[in-house]
Amino acid sequence: MSTGLRKVITLRYAIAFYVSSVLGPSILVMPGLAAKIAGPGSIIAWIGLSLASFPFAYTFASLSARHPESGGVYSFAKEAFGYRVGVVISWLFAFWFITGAPAVTLIAASYLGYAFPLNRAETFLAAFAIISTAFLVNFRGIVVSSKVQLAVIVAIVVLLVAATLSSVSEVRISNFSPFLPNGIIAVGTAASLIFWSYLGYENVSNVAEEFENPKRDFVRSIFLSVLLIGILFVSVSFVTIGTGVYAVGAGGVAPFAAMLSNVIGSYAAVVIAIITAFIIFGVANAYMTGMSRVIYAASKDGALPSFLDKLDPKTRAPSRALIALFSSSMLALVVFYFLNVDLETALLIPSGAAIIIYVIGSSAGIKLMRGNRTKSILAGISLAISLIILPFVGVLLGASFVTIVLALIYAVYFKKRSSVEKVQARKA
């Protein structure tokens, strides 16, 4: 009888995890906002970042294919830089999910308010419901969560493609002129805004141990996922610009609402709310799957408390890690509610942890793949992009630095405790 994680992830499930980890509600919002900033030239930013996302994705996939272990970047960092850096990564991952899950689900809840009248308390209850559903799905095991993820992603992609194709006939070349109304610098500003749309490729590495054939499917799923995500982002941007709908209102969801109305008419607002809820559920579900594997792997190594390393005997899911993530994220949601944390702050707090993880993960890639020039160059590009973006988080990076300090204190304490226990064991 197997006592480890179940190896059931095939190519189609890997693609579903990649797409859901990256494809957030930004696909509904960012094309219009970017076009408001840079005009038609904003499509340069989308194409450029679609291409630039490949080094991130390929670096993490290559590292996972080498040694398909649960924990992903945590395992790479520990291998490259030792136990203490591994502890830091695991704590940053936990912090990322605990603060990030409430933030992204609040986005979905806010979109529900776009179609249905919700007060502040009801918005937070909707966020609670999304996280709870993701937890319950994951608690049933990787087989159930993978199937749900695939179904959600197929439905989302079909709706996005339908909305885009239905608007192609409205595209006018004249809407692409002037191409750079606000200059080339505005394209850079738009790029910095939409960079966050491409985070998420590291998450699938966290479930590497559950791939049926990681050496084959990691690379294949990366190429196909980057291609699919890039096509979706660029296509929606192209139609948003070509139809001129980004001039509606103040950007935001209005352009996509106008596009979707070509498919379903006056019910566009309701459908957008439902699509966004499904997209956010997909993100929450994928990250709860991935992050729980980091917690599981780290607790086995002593980077986190050892009671978190237990698997459910029936589903083989890391049940205690899932419960810990769920309960902690619920606590963060309550804190956000009572402290009146605004959405921008709620998003930037976990973003700091995410980018630091990218910095460490890319650095690990450079060290571990230095024998392969192409792979080490791609890892270097990933590191450079991460370091450029990191300062834009601002003072909220302080929350991640506090997490790092606490992780290092724990690492020292655990090592000392472990040494004492070994000495006592020898004496006994």
Image: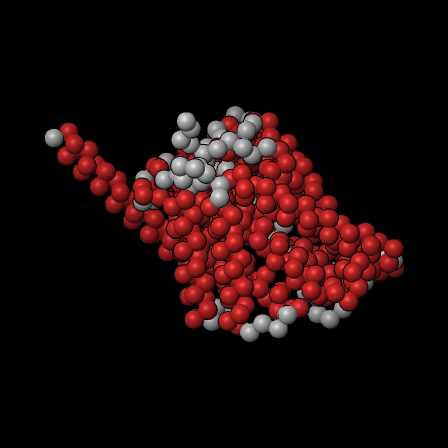
Say whether residue 330 is left or right of residue 130.
Answer: left
Of all residues shown, which one is farthest toward the front? 314
Within the image, what quadrant is residue 84 found in? top left
At horizontal 19% and vertical 37% (from top left) the residue drawn is 421
Let me know if residue 131 appears in the view. yes
Where does residue 49 sit, x and y in percent of width and height?
A: 66, 47
Where does residue 77 sit, x and y in percent of width and height?
A: 43, 38
**Number of labelled discs?**
0
* Vertical order, 199 against 106 (above or below): above
Of all residues shown, which one is farthest toward the left? 427
Where does residue 94 sit, x and y in percent of width and height?
A: 42, 50
Q: Quadrant of the N terminus?
A: top left
At horizontal 73% and vertical 61% (from top left) the residue drawn is 256
At horizontal 19% and vertical 33% (from top left) the residue drawn is 422
At horizontal 61% and vertical 58% (from top left) the residue drawn is 277
Say whether residue 52 is left or right of residue 357.
Answer: right
Q: Nearer the viewer, residue 417 or 116?
A: 116
Where does residue 263 sit, x and y in percent of width and height?
A: 80, 58
Let me know if residue 47 appears in the view. no
- Tell me which colouring the rendered structure shows: secondary structure
Q: Quadrant of the C terminus?
A: top left
Q: Nearer the viewer, residue 41 or 285?
A: 285
Within the image, what quadrant is residue 16 found in? top right
Q: Nearer the viewer, residue 244 or 371?
A: 244
Say whether residue 408 is left or right of residue 219.
Answer: left
